[in-house]
Amino acid sequence: MGLISTIKRKTSTPGTTEVTPGISELATTVLLTGDTGGGDWHGRPSVLDLGSGVWLMAYNTSGGHVDDTNGQIHFKMSDDGGETWTDEDTLLDESGMTGVPIYPTGSLGSTNGPASPLLRLASNGNIIVNTMNLDFTNFPNHLGGAWQAISDDDGETWGAIAQIDFVDIADDDNTVISEDGFVYDGVIYASGVIWHPASEKSDVILVTSDDNGATWDYVSTAIAYDDSENAFEPAIEYLGNNEIIIITRNYEDYAVTYKITSDDLGVTWGSVAEITNETGAVGRPRIYAVDKLKGESTWWAGTNYIMVGFEHQVRGNSFYRRTCIWISTNRCASWTRPIYLDQMYYDAGYSDIVYDSGSDKFVVVSYRGTSVDAADLVQYKFKINGLS
């Protein structure tokens, strides 16, 4: 089952051990099954804890990983720790949501479509779903920008989707922010990328919103494409004391993992460091403070963090992936090696994570497929051992 129990290492002090976190009681559930004959690809989910034990999940469906024809964003809900989920686009009372499915204007039936939805909970209670308008057949030369829709009633109704007009970014069409983010002191912080189609390079950027997603402002470029081999799909999290961390991967051969930090809430950034020897080749990560997942009000005061994503298994190839998590017990100063949740699949791993207090277990939502033509939406539920 891929069961990984707590590992204990000997230390220099006789009779003591150093505990390295691991997982146990791993259970895998297929939530939606892909059909290669029908081109059912279900993937890139995001999950959000709305409070009181209610979870909202967003995911996109399309004709395949690299086929966004008729791509759409759908939703499911759970109030029992992921033991059951509602039908597609259905509320807990079995009534239908309004304003769904979601897709960028004019994309339905074209080669463009939404990809990688990311759910955010704003300070005023609004739920934001960010996505991008993407044509994989000509990527990155045909992006359609960052888009979002907002619900102000816990996902019951969704407003019209609209493209974001960023403040101080000239090229909105080649900017995306559906990677990762956090909310601190009422401000939404979002990691993103500005693509440069002519060179097929990208800048990792930080944008913020201080009005619950109504407007978005460019703050800084964390990694310019001439600082690395070309970084994209950045994870971001707050570490306390005005410090932010970004972990990202390169686009050239999918084999390098980078880390960079800021000590002034992203106004300026330190030097880029490679951490591949520590983490392996990380793919599309998201980072969470464990205390945030557990609902602590001052979650940034803790030291335990989780990163979720996948590890590239073949250098130079975007595919052949294993969904996994990484754990840090020292505020992201160092990480465990990948803790695998599944076997290798050709296509897999864009994931998100929540915590179920009732069972003291974590739930990762992800996807997996044996080709790019169909994918199952899957869930992994497990305990983490060895966290103090």
Image (spheres, rainbow, N blue to C red):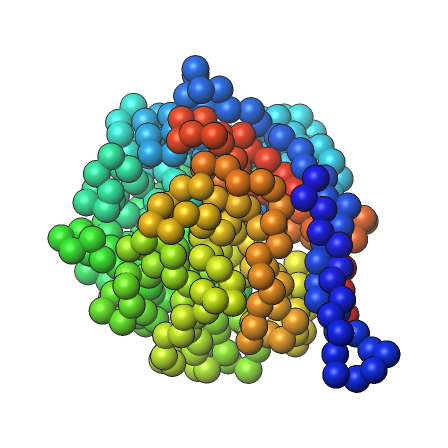
Residue nearer the viewer, 277 or 116: 277
Question: Farthest residue toward the left?
Answer: 198
Left or right: 50, with 229 as reference point:
right
Which residue is pictured at 24% across the width and 62% down the height?
169
Which residue is pictured at 49% across the width and 51% down the height?
311
Which picture quadrant has residue 2?
A: top right
Query: In this rendering, does residue 117 appear at all?
Result: no
Q: Is residue 342 above or below residue 208?
A: above
Left or right: 265, with 50 as reference point:
left
Residue 377 % position (x, y): 55, 33
Which picture quadrant has residue 136?
A: top left
Query: In this rendering, does residue 227 appear at all?
Result: yes
Residue 10 % position (x, y): 75, 74
Left or right: 40, with 224 as reference point:
right
Residue nearer the viewer, 54 or 45: 45
Which residue is pictured at 16% across the width and 55% down the height?
199
Residue 378 % position (x, y): 59, 35
Residue nearer the viewer, 60 or 127: 60
Residue 372 % position (x, y): 40, 31
Question: Farthest residue toward the right?
Answer: 15
Residue nearer the viewer, 72 or 352: 352
Q: How many marks?
A: 0
Quarter placement of the N terminus: top right
